[in-house]
Image (spheres, grey):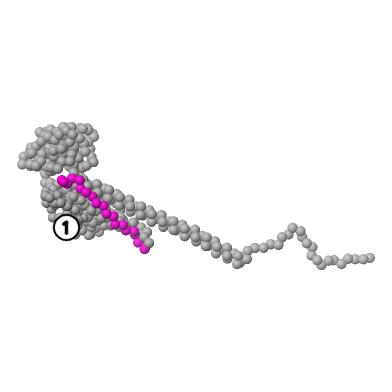
């Protein structure tokens, strides 16, 4: 009987595949490539973020510059003006010279160098709202160029002015400029009720804060109750008088800003204004000749309307700074901008 010996050859198993995986070298290469990719993405993100911060800060700087120049230049341009274009101004306010906001005769435009004390501003210091040392300031008085109400009639005997609307916006103790084509007058309203009456009064009364006279004619006469009286013509205007001083001060965030102070208080206008320097161009009142050079405020000794040399233009130089350190040297970006303002209300 024959027998067959078992074979030593292993049996094959169809369908079974040989298993394989990443080697340690392949895994390390993949990790390095992944890190390089992630690093590139992070670098792009950081670059875009820095670009965004830079553009945002530069945009804010430009916007602050635009606001500063637009608002300040508008007031400087209208210094001493009124809606009627009258050049003669009577001032019947009691003790007009004791407050800078009503002292028209001292000059409707007055500048202050960094070393000069500016009226209406706290002495230079470090507190919020105080003027920054060695920065210029400028004071502007105007007849209110943007809120005039038309005069319907004026009874000089009763010191009452009838306006074209009951919604005139005036109130008792408001300081106003009354004008027509002949002259203008600065006075305080002794009675006014907005929304119910179109009549406002400028009586001299008996109080020390009232007007020295009812008469609003030029020149001012405070020697009697009626003073130098005349009736302003229909078609004239009554406007709020504006008085403001512009300067660079400390803000509440540890930086500097452009500020505007008036009789109502101090307001912050634009952030990031580090410095303000002002120059003035003079014209000889007798000959009409312009000076050849700009001068600073300390070189001008007479700012009144009758001065031999009148300021006809102001050169504003503002230095602005971004809020964040977005410069290439890791410092805030600074820009100095210049704007020239011609005064409209100066006789040719």
Magenta span: 329-348
Residue depicted at 79% across the width and 65% down the height: 10
The residue under the point 36% across, 63% down is 329
Residue 52 found in image quarter = bottom left
Above or below residue 198? Residue 331 is below
Please state the horizontal and vertical placement of residue 234, each as a whole percent of the image: 16, 33
| In the image, residue 330 lies in the stretch drawn in magenta | yes
Q: Secondary structure at mark 1?
A: helix
- Left/right placement of residue 170 relative to residue 329 reads left
Instruction: Name the spot of residue 41 as percent of width and height, x first.
Output: 49, 58
Viewer-closest of 340 and 321: 340
Q: Which residue is mark 1?
A: 298
Question: How dense is the environment of label 1, judged by Cα within 10 Å: few (below 14), some, or many (20 and up)?
Answer: few
Residue 182 visible in the snapshot: yes
Residue 274 is one of the magenta-drawn residues = no
Q: Residue at x 18, y 45 (%)?
A: 345
- For residue 136, above or below residue 238: below
Residue closer to the observer: 298 or 158:
298
Q: Quadrant of residue 156?
A: top left
The residue sitting at the left extreme is 223
Residue at 19% x, 53% y: name it: 281
* Count of numbered badges drawn on the protein: 1
Q: Is residue 99 visible?
A: no
Residue 264 at x, y percent in the picture: 22, 46
Seen as rendered, the residue at the extreme right is 1
Give residue 319's position: percent from left, percent from top. 28, 57
Q: Is residue 14 left or right of residue 53?
A: right
On-image quarter of the N terminus? bottom right
Is residue 125 left or right of 92 when viewed as pictured?
Answer: right
Q: Is residue 156 left or right of residue 338?
A: left
């Amino acid at each position: 009987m024959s027998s067959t010996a078992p074979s030593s050859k292993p049996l094959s198993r169809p369908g079974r595949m040989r298993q394989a995986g990443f080697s340690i070298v392949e895994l390390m290469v993949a990790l390095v490539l992944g890190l390089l990719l992630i690093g590139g993405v992070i670098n792009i993100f950081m670059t875009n973020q820095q670009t965004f911060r830079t553009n945002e800060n530069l945009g804010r700087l430009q916007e602050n510059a635009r606001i500063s120049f637009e608002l300040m230049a508008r007031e400087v341009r209208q210094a001493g003006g009124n809606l009627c274009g009258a050049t003669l101004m009577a001032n019947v306010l009691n003790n007009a010279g004791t407050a800078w906001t009503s002292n028209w005769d001292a000059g409707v435009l007055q500048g202050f160098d960094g070393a000069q004390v500016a009226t209406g501003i706290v002495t230079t210091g470090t507190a919020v709202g105080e003027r920054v040392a060695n920065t210029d300031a400028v004071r502007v008085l105007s007849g209110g160029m943007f809120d005039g109400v038309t005069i319907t009639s004026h009874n000089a005997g009763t010191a009452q002015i009838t306006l074209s609307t009951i919604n005139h916006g005036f109130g008792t103790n408001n300081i106003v400029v009354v004008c027509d084509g002949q002259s203008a007058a600065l006075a305080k309203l002794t009675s006014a009720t907005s929304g119910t009456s179109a009549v406002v009064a400028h009586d001299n009364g008996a109080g020390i804060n009232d007007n020295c006279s009812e008469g609003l004619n030029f020149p001012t006469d405070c020697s009697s109750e009626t003073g130098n009286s005349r009736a302003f013509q229909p078609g004239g205007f009554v406007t709020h008088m504006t008085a403001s001083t512009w300067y660079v001060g400390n803000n509440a965030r540890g930086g500097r800003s452009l500020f505007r102070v008036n009789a109502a208080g101090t307001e912050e206008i634009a952030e990031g204004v580090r410095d303000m320097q002002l120059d003035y161009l003079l014209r000889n009142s007798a000959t009409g000749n312009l000076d050849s050079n700009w001068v600073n405020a300390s070189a001008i000794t007479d700012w009144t309307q009758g001065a031999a040399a009148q300021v006809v233009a102001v050169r504003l130089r503002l230095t602005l700074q971004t809020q964040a350190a977005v410069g290439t040297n890791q410092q805030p970006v600074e820009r100095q901008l210049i704007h020239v303002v011609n005064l409209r209300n100066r006789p040719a």
